[in-house]
Image (tube, rainbow, N blue to C red):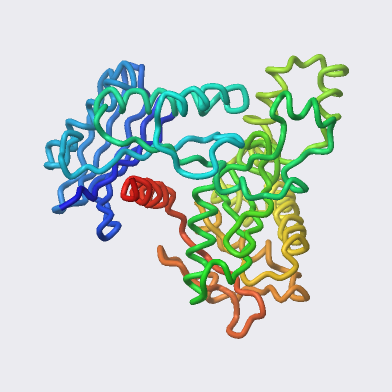
Amino acid sequence: MSPTRVLVLNSGSSSVKYQLLDMRDNSRLAVGLVERIGEETSRLKHTPLHGGGATRESTGPIPDHEAALKAVSAELAKDGLGLDSSELAAIGHRVVHGGKSFTEPTVIDEAVLAEIERLIPVAPLHNPANLTGIRTARALRPDLPQVAVFDTAFHTTMPESAARYAIDVRTADEYRIRRYGFHGTSHAFVSRATAELLGRAPEDVNVIVLHLGNGASASAVEKGRCVDTSMGLTPLEGLVMGTRSGDLDPAVIFHLARVGGLSTDEIDTLLNKRSGLIGLCGDNDMREIRRRVDEGDQQAQLAFDIYIHRLKKYIGAYYAVLGRVDAVAFTAGVGENAAPVREAAIAGLQELGLAVDAELNAVRSDEPRLISPAGARVAVAVVPTDEELEIAAQTYALVARN
C-alpha cells in the first residue's frame, strides 16, 4: 500500500507547529507545538490522537529548528509515528508569501527555495522562518517529497484590476508592489466548506469569507476563485485587527515621519504591533473587549464599533464586487466564537438579504452551521477553518499525482 500520512509543519521564527494526518480518512494522528526555540525555557507540547494517549509536555533548551524537529520526531516515534516511518508520504510546509510565482502547491527544490528567499523583503517576519523549517526537514528526510503550500496562492486568481495599486506601473513592477493577500489556505478551505454546507458545488457559489482572528482578512470568492481580498502587499492592509491598523491614509506615515519625527521602524512597529484593537482600547482579545463593553466601558465600545464599521464596509464592498452573494461565512477565532461580532456585522443589512437568527447565532459548536433565518436570501454561516487539513490535502494530492 502507498504511504498515506502527511506531516504538516508551520515554522515560525521561534516556534514549530505540527500535525500528522492520515489522508485515507483525514484523521489526525498527532498534534503539537515547539515554542521559545533558542531559549533556555523552550517548551514542547505533544498530543497523540492515535490510540488515545495523554498529552506530553517538556521544557528545556532547544537551540534551533533542527533540534526542534528532532525532538518532534522523537515524540512521534514514541507513538510509532516517527519521521522515519515508511507510511509518511510527504511533509507539507506552510509558506506565507509566494508572490506571483507560486499559484499552487509546489514540490520544493533548490529553485523553489531561492524564490522563497527572494521574496523575503515583502515577508521579512515569515519567509525566513518558513525557509528554516523547510531546510531542516529536508536535511532530516532528503528522500521524502516536501511541498510548499502558500498563503498567497489562493489569491493569485484576482484580476489585475483588484491586484494592482494605482501607482506608477514601472515602480510597482520593479519592487513587486501589488495586492497578494494572505490567509489563503483558510479562505480556500472555508469557501469550499461553505458550498458543501449549502449542498452546492464551489463553482456554483459566490461567498464572502471573513477570517477573523488576531489577524483578520476578507475575501470575495466567485465560483470557487478569489476575485478580491482585503490584505495587500503585506498582512497590514484591510480590516481592523488585534494589533494592526488595517486600512490607513498613506499620508499618515509621512505625517508621523515629518511632524512626529518617528523613524521607519518606529512607524512599522506602531502600525503592526500597537494599533488595531490594542491601540484603540489596550486589549486585543475580543472576549475581554466584550466584557468591558458589557460593563459600560466607552473606550472598549468605541474600539468594537470601529472594528464592526470596517467589517461592515468590506461586506458591502465585496457584495458589490460579486454582484450576487450566496453566503457570508465567518471563520477563525473571533469569527467562530464571538456571536456579538457576527450579529453586529450583519445588523442593518436586511436590504441585501442578510440577517442573523439570534438563537442560532448563540449556539456554540465545532461544526459548520447556518445562523441565518430559514428561507433567507443569503446564507450566513459559521465555518470552522482547518488550514492544516487544507495544507495536508493539497500536499497529498500533489505527491499522489507525481
Q: Is residue 388 visible?
A: yes
* Identity of the residue drawn at 67% across and 49% down: 158
Q: Residue furthest bottom?
A: 375
Residue 250 pos. (x, y %): 82, 32
The x and y percentages for residue 119 are 57, 26
The quadrant the C terminus occupies is top left
For residue 379, which quarter of the picture?
bottom right
Q: Position of residue 198 (x, y in %)?
A: 52, 75
Please give the name of the residue rendered at 68% of the width and 62% of the height, measured from the top-left corner. Answer: 345
Foreground of the two, 136 or 381: 136
Q: Classify residue 316 as left or right of residue 333.
A: right
Who is closer to the viewer here, 385 or 95? 95
Q: Residue at x 75, y 67 (%)?
A: 323
Q: Is residue 96 left or right of residue 84?
A: right
Q: Give the image location of residue 365, x and y in percent.
A: 42, 66
The one of 297 and 248 positioned closer to us in this rendering: 248
- Residue 175 placement, left or right of 339: right
Residue 129's place in the image compared with 189, above or below, is above
Q: Residue at point 70% right, 51% down?
A: 301
Left or right of 34, for residue 127? right
